[in-house]
Image (cartoon, rainbow, N blue to C red):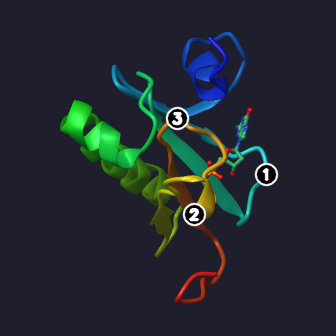
């Protein structure tokens, strides 16, 4: 098992979780790009968001409800969610993960 997020999900790497349910986990990003930068992942391995939508649509939906709850817990009045899919779009970890970013202004369109 070489997937780093599977290792986190399997508790092989000690991490502190901001949210945990049967299907989903959330933890702080190692290289935060905003004052709040949380990754919300399915526990089961899936390469990207589209594959997760096919494999387990309820888990995909829960990534968003978990993000909403964490954003409320952190007092964010707005936040950005993003999935990078494929290396050309900036995906570097090939286990689906929702980025939850907040605590600073965000430009649109994103870079
Ligand atoms: P992406 O580039 O969209 O695949 O995002 C991967 C994110 O995962 C990136 O922001 C850095 C983060 N990351 C990579 N390895 C680890 C890790 O071991 N622990 C944590 N907490 N975050 C990680």
Q: Residue at x 73, y 64 (%)?
A: 33
**Where, by quadrant of the figure, is residue 54 drawn?**
top left
Q: Does the closest atom of ligand 1 sit within 8 Å of the Cβ of label 1?
A: yes
Circle nearer the viewer, 1 or 3: 3
Which residue is at the front of the view, 62 or 86? 86
- Whether residue 62 is visible to the viewer of this picture, yes or no, is no
Furthest toward the bottom, the residue is 108
Which residue is at the front of the view, 96 or 104? 96
**Where, by quadrant of the figure, is residue 89 drawn?**
bottom right
Counting from the top left corner in percent of width and height, residue 13 is at 72, 16
- The residue at which mark 1 appears reads as 31
- The residue at which mark 3 appears reads as 95
Counting from the top left corner in percent of width and height, residue 50 is at 32, 47
Q: Gap between marks 1 and 3, in whole Å? A: 17 Å
**Quadrant of the rendered image holding ligand 1:** top right
Specify the quadrant that holds the C terminus. bottom right
| Badge 1 or badge 3: first in the primary sequence | 1
Circle nearer the viewer, 2 or 1: 2
**Residue 22 as seen in the image, left or right of residue 103:** left
Q: Residue at x 34, y 19 (%)?
A: 22
């Amino acid at each position: 098992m070489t997937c780093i997020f599977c290792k986190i999900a399997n508790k092989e790497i000690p991490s502190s979780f901001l949210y945990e349910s049967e299907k989903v986990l959330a933890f702080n990003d190692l290289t935060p790009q905003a004052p709040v930068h949380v990754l919300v992942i399915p526990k089961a391995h899936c390469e990207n968001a589209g594959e997760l939508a096919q494999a387990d649509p309820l888990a995909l939906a829960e990534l968003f409800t978990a993000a909403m709850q964490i954003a409320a817990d952190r007092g964010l009045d707005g936040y950005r969610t993003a999935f990078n899919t494929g290396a050309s779009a900036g995906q570097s970890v090939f286990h689906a993960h929702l980025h939850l970013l907040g605590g600073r202004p965000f430009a649109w369109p994103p870079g």
